[in-house]
Image (cartoon, grey):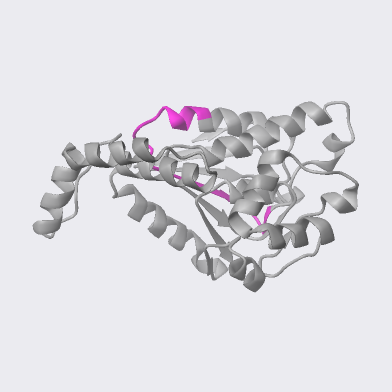
Amino acid sequence: MYQGSEGGPSLEIERNVARIRLNRPDRHNRFEPADIETMSAMLGNLALRTQARVLIVTARGQSFSSGFDLETLSGPRARECTAAFAALCDRIETMPIPTVCGINGNVYGGATDIALACDFRIGVQGCRLQMSPARLGIQYYHSGLRRYVERLGLTEAKRLFLTGEQVDTATMLRIGFLSEVSPSEELEARLSAIADALAQRSPKSLRGLKASLNAIARGLDDASAIDASFFESLASSDAKEGLNAWSERRPAKFADA
């Protein structure tokens, strides 16, 4: 296990699954400047480790995160640190491996963007969401606004940002912020089940599919390049193994990407 500064995020890798956990439950896992640096370094390390096939992001305690440290927002490093936070969220979104966010409690402010940057978001029953820049007299960075509009649609993004309304679990699920809801006592088991299932898929296929889907969602896709990758994959060793495993009714054994 790798642990950053005291109370900072920790990184564990067990078999093919990496897990980053927020560790400031007494402060509702708010993000401090050191946490941003630590988590960014962890993500950079993971992107180079081909044996890590899935990333889970979750937290200790009763809250997922209260968001960015408000004291920093009013300090001399506000511009520097918020830019670093935006880059952290972008880095999560562009991680080559699938990412799963385990929302173990309430999620507020910038932490909602950490969650939206992940591919899957599993929330516990009773969790709530609130996004309050307008209540603080500030606006928001471009990529965070983009993720809200892409994931939730313009109407819901406007409702959450402009009104600062707190919404409940059912609403989070309905608008697409959550992929699914789990009883709190079953969250860890559900996260492990999803991660294990993803880890059994072809890592190369997952990376290519994720990159293509993200590009399509942002209108940055190259149809000919995506088609070329598809046709190339048909002759790959992964395709041979996958098709053989399917016909032999056994789990496929894919190599690391």
User: 250 or 139, which lies in front?
Assistant: 139
Residue 60: in magenta span: yes
- Residue at the (68%, 57%) spot, across then down: 154
Could you tell me residue 256's position as x and y percent?
A: 28, 35
Q: From the top left corner, tell me how far across and down residue 73 is, in percent.
A: 85, 37
- Is residue 243 visible in the rendered image? The answer is yes
For the residue pair 91 and 41, the one nearer the viewer reads as: 91
Residue at the outermost bottom position: 170
Can residue 24 be seen in this snapshot?
Answer: no
Question: x%, y% of residue 253?
Answer: 19, 45
For the record, the magenta segment spans 44-64
Is residue 34 located in the magenta-colored stretch of the structure? no
Q: Residue at x 73, y 31 (%)?
A: 83
Q: Residue at the left extreme?
A: 248
**Which residue is at 89% across, 48% downward?**
136
Picture coordinates of residue 200, whole percent (x, y): 29, 50
Quadrant that contains the C terminus: top left
Q: Is residue 162 left or right of residue 93?
A: right
Compared to residue 2, the image places residue 183 above or below, namely: below
Q: Nearer the viewer, residue 220 or 67?
A: 220
Q: Quadrant of residue 9?
A: top right
* Residue farthest to the front, as pictured: 224
Q: For the image shown, how many numbered marks are present on the structure?
A: 0
User: In the rendered image of this protein, does residue 208 appear above or below residue 80?
Assistant: below
In-image side of 55 versus 239 (left or right): right
9 to the left or right of 255: right
Q: Quadrant of residue 161?
A: bottom right
Residue at image position (48%, 28%) is 45
